[in-house]
Image (spheres, rainbow, N blue to C red):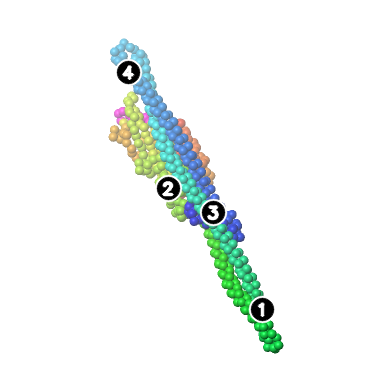
């Protein structure tokens, strides 16, 4: 779950913990109250800052790539302009040479008086001019190829810059959205905290009132009990007075009967006084009994008030306990969510590192990690294989539909032909690709092929320009085996693919090259060494022993009297393939690739 999705009720429960502190309960709950909210709000602020930083970084990268693309475009256009000028100059020189040749031939025909030596001299000058024109033409075409390559690179950089710009804009939108969401959640949390604090104040006030009521009820009960005690005492005194009055009346009557000689008036007066005292005593007794009854009723009312106040206090204390329990549960939920989020972050990093560790770029690694956070561990390998399969053509820079795996494909673009004595010299821009599962070895040639004008067979092959490279899912250094030996078997090619002059319909076409060389290369992973050879491309090419360095091997190479070097890299998750090139006499000459057999330990 997302940490920012804490509900309003959660925030209220966090604040209600304050109820416990006003009732003499545990004050630590009130102190802990804002910690969850503060942590949540701080996390949202941190996420917003990270999003803004990512947005700024993505924009900077995109602007840099756009700048590089513009510079590359300008350079490509400049090279194209230089190439066009060179081509124009070459054409002019060729025309001058042609005119000189015509003039020389004309002079040779019309000037029979010229000596053989002079005629030879004129012909040599014409040939020299023709050779200069041919060299100028080659240089112009070479510049044109370089300009075209620069243009292609510039277009690729421009497209990469555009994609980076799109990604940066997308990240900017996501960052703004994350920022707005964080601000919105922070405002909700603030409002919830204010509401919870208000409820806490109200709860504290209610508890204080309940305690005051309980105290007043206790005081009323004590007063009622004291009043009852006093009334009981007054009643007892009244009853005593009634007894005393009745005794006085009886004594008076007895005295009246026993003292006949006394005056009847005094006797009546005494009797009347005695009767009056009896009435007063009886009235005092009745008043005391009424007061006792009222006091008992007041005592009962006070006792009930005490009970009600105690019940109200118990209810408020129960609410405080429930709020504290809810806070504890919410804290636990927050901690669990935080742990879950930390676990997801750790898993994301592990998946990202896994994808980067096998050679995927950062963007693809991010997408893989993000998409597989909930993927079971047992399914991760197949998920990674699926991503690799989807990304391989992108990493290799080709389409496997156009360049089938295991095949060497050649694509030719004719750049014209000329007659040179007994030969037809064809100029060809040629691309060759050897596509394997994890890698593709790609060569760009600009060649001159000379064919016998009469028989049509190949007499000379000159790779004027050559550039060979291998790209794909490069093996990370940590994933190269460290034990045993294995042999890589595969194919090799150079630019010469025609033994006879191609037919017109065979020009400017794409075709599978069946006539290819074979590669055998053995690696001792324990010793970190490798050596091999290439057959089928003329004399055997020896790939001398080299040392594994980084994710590849380089060493010297030899073909008959030609010397040079070779270099290769490991490709695949665990060095399942190799791909590289052989350079002879300073030119990229041969491209090769191979697939590993079983490692023998």
Circle 4 or circle 3, nearest the eye: 3
Residue at 47 percent of width and 40 percent of height: 58
Residue at label 1? 241
Q: Is residue 323 above or below residue 533?
A: below
Tell me the distance, in whole angstroms, between the alpha carbons under discs 3 and 2: 51 Å
Sequence-first tag of 3 and 2: 3
Front residue of 441 and 566: 441
Q: Quadrant of residue 561?
A: top left
Q: Are marks 3 and 2 in contact (CB under 8 Å)?
A: no
Assign a secondary structure to mark 4: helix
> Is 250 on the left-hand or right-hand side of 153?
right
Residue at label 4? 99
Circle 2 or circle 1, nearest the eye: 1
Tell me the distance, in whole angstroms, between the alpha carbons under discs 1 and 4: 167 Å
Residue at label 3? 197
Residue at 46 percent of width and 43 percent of height: 176
Tell me the distance, in whole angstroms, between the alpha carbons under discs 2 and 1: 112 Å
Classify 10 Å Cα crowding around label 2: few (below 14), some (14-19), many (20 and above).
some
Tell me the distance, in whole angstroms, between the alpha carbons under discs 4 and 3: 102 Å
Q: Are marks 4 and 3 in contact (CB under 8 Å)?
A: no
Residue 449 highlighted magenta (yes or no): yes
Sequence-first tag of 1 and 4: 4
């Amino acid at each position: 779950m997302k940490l920012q999705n804490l509900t309003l009720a959660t925030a209220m429960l966090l604040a209600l913990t304050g109820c416990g502190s006003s009732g003499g309960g545990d004050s630590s709950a009130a102190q802990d109250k804002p910690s969850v909210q503060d942590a949540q709000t701080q996390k949202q602020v941190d996420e917003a800052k990270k999003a803004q930083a990512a947005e700024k970084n993505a924009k900077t990268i995109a602007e840099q790539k756009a700048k590089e693309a513009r510079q590359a475009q300008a350079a490509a256009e400049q090279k194209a302009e230089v190439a066009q000028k060179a081509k124009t100059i070459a054409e002019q020189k060729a025309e001058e040479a042609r005119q000189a040749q015509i003039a020389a031939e004309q002079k040779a025909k019309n000037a029979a008086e010229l000596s053989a030596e002079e005629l030879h001299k004129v012909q040599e000058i014409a040939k020299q001019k023709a050779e200069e024109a041919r060299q100028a033409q080659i240089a112009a075409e070479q510049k044109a190829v370089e300009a075209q390559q620069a243009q292609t690179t510039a277009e690729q950089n421009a497209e990469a810059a555009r994609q980076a710009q799109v990604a940066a804009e997308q990240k900017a939108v996501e960052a703004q959205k994350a920022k707005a969401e964080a601000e919105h959640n922070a405002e909700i949390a603030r409002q919830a905290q204010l509401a919870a604090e208000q409820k806490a104040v109200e709860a504290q006030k209610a508890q204080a009132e309940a305690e005051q009521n309980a105290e007043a009820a206790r005081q009323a009960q004590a007063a009622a009990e004291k009043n009852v005690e006093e009334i009981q005492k007054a009643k007892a005194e009244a009853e005593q007075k009634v007894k005393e009055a009745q005794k006085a009346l009886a004594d008076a009557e007895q005295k009246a009967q026993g003292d006949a000689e006394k005056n009847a008036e005094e006797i009546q007066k005494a009797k009347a006084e005695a009767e009056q005292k009896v009435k007063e005593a009886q009235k005092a007794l009745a008043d005391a009994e009424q007061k006792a009854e009222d006091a008992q009723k007041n005592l009962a009312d006070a006792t009930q008030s005490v009970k009600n106040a105690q019940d109200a206090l118990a209810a408020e204390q129960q609410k405080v306990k429930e709020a504290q329990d809810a806070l504890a549960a919410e804290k636990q939920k927050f901690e669990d969510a935080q742990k879950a989020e930390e676990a997801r972050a750790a898993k994301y990093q592990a998946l990202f590192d896994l994808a980067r560790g096998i050679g995927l770029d950062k963007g693809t690694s991010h997408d893989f990690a993000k998409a597989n956070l909930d993927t079971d561990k047992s399914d991760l390998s197949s998920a990674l294989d699926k991503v690799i399969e989807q990304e391989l053509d992108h990493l290799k820079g080709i389409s496997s539909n156009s360049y089938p795996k295991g095949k060497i494909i050649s694509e030719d673009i004719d750049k014209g032909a000329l007659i040179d004595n007994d030969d037809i010299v064809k100029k060809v821009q040629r691309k060759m690709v050897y596509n394997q599962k994890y890698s593709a070895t790609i060569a760009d040639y600009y060649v001159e092929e000379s064919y016998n004008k009469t028989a049509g067979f190949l007499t000379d092959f000159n790779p004027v320009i050559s550039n060979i490279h291998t790209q794909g899912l490069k093996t990370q250094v940590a994933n190269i085996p460290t034990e045993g030996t294995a042999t890589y078997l595969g194919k090799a090619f150079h630019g010469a693919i025609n033994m006879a002059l191609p037919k017109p319909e065979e020009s400017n076409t794409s075709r599978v090259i069946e006539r290819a060389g074979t590669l055998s290369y053995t690696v001792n992973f324990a010793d970190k060494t490798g050596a091999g050879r290439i057959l089928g491309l003329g004399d055997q090419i020896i790939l001398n022993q080299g040392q594994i360095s980084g994710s590849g091997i380089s060493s010297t190479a030899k073909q008959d009297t030609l010397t040079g070097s070779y270099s290769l890299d490991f490709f695949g998750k665990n060095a399942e393939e190799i791909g590289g090139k052989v350079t002879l006499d300073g030119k990229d000459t041969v491209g090769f690739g191979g697939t590993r057999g079983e490692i023998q330990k």
